[in-house]
Image (spheres, rainbow, N blue to C red):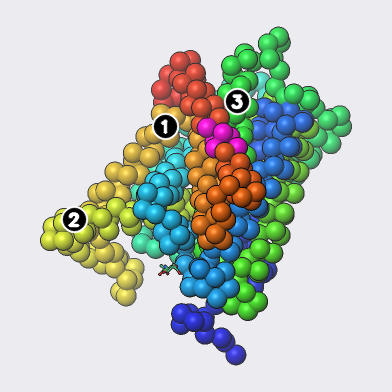
Amino acid sequence: MEMVDDDGLTRTGTVWTATTHAITAVIGSGVLALPWSVAQMGWVFGPLALVACAYVTYYTAILLCDCYRTPDPVKGRRNHTYMDVVRSCLGPRDVFICAIAQYVMLWGTMIGYTIVASTSMMSVERSNCVHKHGHGADCRASGNLYMIIFGVAEIVLSQCPSLEKVTFISVVAAVMSVAYSLIGLGLCAGKFASHRAARGTVSGVKVGGVGGVSATTKTWHSFQALGNIAFAYTYSMLLVEIQDTLKSSPPENQTMKRASLYGIGVTAIFYISLGCVGYAAFGNDAPGNVLTGFYEPFWLVDIANVAVLVHLVGAYQVYGQPIYAKYEEWLAKKWPHAGFIHKLYTVPLPFSKSHSFKFTLCKLLLRTVFVALTTLIAMMLPFFNAIMGLLGSVAFWPLTVYFPVTIYISQANVKRGERRWLALQGLSAVALLVSLLAAVGSVADIAQRLKHVALFKSEL
Ligand SMILES: *[C@@H]1O[C@H](CO)[C@@H](O)[C@H](O)[C@H]1NC(C)=O
C-alpha cells in the first residue's frame, strides 16, 4: 500500500536510497584532484585535511537535516530545496548571497567540466600514442580543439529541455563516476605496488633545490589543495533535495542523519584511500588530474578517461539547465510580449512523427552564446586545480558552513553568546578563513601561470 504524504505527493525513499543518492551525488570529478592535493600538503596535513573536511561536512549536514521541516523538525512544514530553506529561515540579504553562491558554483562547475573533459580526451590521445610509438615519442596533445568539440556537443544538448531530470542519464552518470573513481584507485594501487616503497614526504612538495618549487608557489598550491578537497566534498547543496524524497516515517530528519553518516563516511573512506594511495604511488610529482599520470595498461586508462567524458557530457547539463531556466524566467517576466522570447517555432523531426523540435529564438541564441562563453573561459584558463580550488572556496564557507550554521541558529533558537553559539560561530570563522585562503591561493596561482604561459595554451 502506498502512503500519500501531507502534501499530496508519494515518497518512498529510505535510508538506503538516500545514502546511494548522497554517495553518487558527492563523488564526481573532484576525486581526480585528491592525490595532487595530498601531495601539496604532505603526509601530515594532507590526510588531516581530508578527515577534517569530511567531519565539517558531516557536522553541518546534521544541522541542516533538522531544517527540512520548520519550525518543528518533525511536524513542521516542508521545504523542497536548499534555497527554500534559506528563504524561509533567513532574510532577503542571505537569500541573495545564497543565490549568487549557487549560480557561481553552477557556472564555475561548467567551466571546470569543460577543462576536465578536454584533459580526458587529450589523455586518451596521448596514452594511445605512447602505446603505439613508445615513451620517447613526441606525444603532446593540445586541448583547445577538444574543448571546442565538447562545447559544440553541449550547445546541441542545451536545446533539449529538462535533460537533467531524465533518470537514465543520472544512472549512467552515477555508474560512470563510480567506474572512473575505482579505476583511478586501482591504477594508483597498481603503481604503488610496482615500486613497493611509499613515496612522498612529511611536508609534501619540496621548497627549493632539485625538483622543488619556490616558497610562494608552495604556499599557493597548499591553499589551493584545501579548496580542491573542499570541492570534492560538496554535499549540503543537495541534501535538502535528497531529504525531500524520503517517506515520512520514521521522521525524515532521523533517516537523513543516518544517510548522511553513511554517505559521507563511505565518501571519506574512499577519498582518504585515493588521496593517500595516489600520493604513495606518485609522491610529490602527483599530477593535477590523477588519470593523466598513467600510460599503461592503456586500455584501462582509456576506459577511465572515456567514463569521465561520458559523465561530464551529461552532468554539464545538470549544472547548465537551472541557469538557463533562471535567466529565461527573468527575461520572460521583463518582456512579457517580446516575440524573440515567447514565439515558439516548431520543426518536425525527420524520423519521428510524434516528436518535434520546439524552440524560441531566445533559447536558441542565448544558450548557444552562454555555452560558447563558458568554453572560451575554459580555453583561456585551462588550470584544473586552480579552478577547482576557486569552486571549493565558494562551496565551503558559504554553502557548506555559513548557511547551515546560521539557519540552525535561527531555527533552534540558539542564543547569542551561549556556548553552542560561540562554537558554531567559531566553526564558521575557521571555515571562512579556509575559503579565503583557497580563493587567494587559486587566484594568485592563475595570475602566476598567466605570466609564464600564453593565453589559450592548454597542453598535456
Ligand atoms: C518553507 O517553510 C516555511 C516555514 O514552514 C513555509 O512558510 C514555506 O511556505 C515553505 N516553502 C516552500 C516553498 O514550501
Of badges 2 and 1, the one in the foreground is 2
The type of residue carrying mark 1 is Met
The residue under label 2 is 334
The residue under label 1 is 379
Q: Quadrant of ligand 1?
A: bottom left
Q: Position of residue 39 (x, y in %)?
A: 70, 29
Q: For the view shown, which residue lies furthest in the top direction?
A: 209
Main secondary-structure element of the magenta-colored stretch = helix
The type of residue carrying mark 2 is Lys
| Residue depicted at 49% across the width and 82% down the height | 6
Earlier along the polypeptide chain: callout 2 or callout 3? 3
Quadrant occupied by the N terminus: bottom right
| Residue depicted at 40% across the width and 46% down the height | 97
The type of residue carrying mark 3 is His
Q: CA distance from mark 3 to mark 1?
A: 21 Å
User: 26 or 143, which is in the foreground?
Assistant: 26
Q: Position of residue 64 (x, y in %)?
A: 57, 58
Earlier along the polypeptide chain: callout 2 or callout 1? 2
Q: Position of residue 95 (x, y in %)?
A: 39, 52
Q: CA distance from mark 2 to mark 1?
A: 33 Å
Q: Give the residues in magenta.
A: 430-436
Q: Which mark is residue 75?
A: none
